[in-house]
Amino acid sequence: MDCRRCDAVCCRMSVTVMPSDSVPGYLLDTDEAGRTVMARNDEGWCAAIDPYHLRCTIYSQRPAICRQFDMGGDDCRLVRQDYRRQQHDLSTILSTF
């Protein structure tokens, strides 16, 4: 896996913030179940991501769940595979129009 070509797909996933996390309040939101989650921008990305460099702007303060998500690990590979499959399916659908 080449992490230099990462699409930062994990930064589009819902991230539940735990009470012990020290995420700045302006980056927090509440989901439909009432849980505290990382806010998202208009395009669905985590609000803490720098969209030009695909880097976390609060890396040292990122939620515990983000700390546990290993780059290149099993979860990362599964999320990237699913993303690529969805992109392929979407391009197949769009090519029929």
Image (spheres, rainbow, N blue to C red):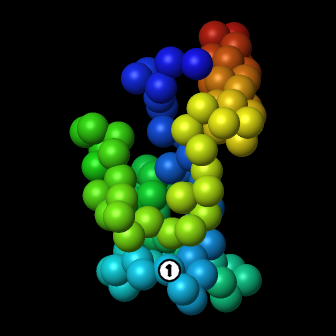
Most extreme residue toward the left is: 52
Tell me residue 3's x, y (percent): 47, 26
Residue located 71% across and 41% down the image: 75
Instruction: Name the residue type under label 1.
Output: Asp
Rendered position, 48 above or below 1? below
Most extreme residue toward the top is: 95
Tell me residue 61's x, y (percent): 38, 70
The quarter of the picture where residue 65 lies is: bottom right
Q: Is residue 86 left or right of residue 55?
A: right
Q: Quadrant of the C terminus?
A: top right
The kind of secondary structure element at disc 1 is: loop
Residue located 61% across and 56% down the image: 68
Residue located 33% across and 45% down the image: 55
The quarter of the picture where residue 94 lies is: top right
The quarter of the picture where residue 5 lies is: top left
Rendered position, 47 above or below 75? below
**Residue tagged 1:** 21
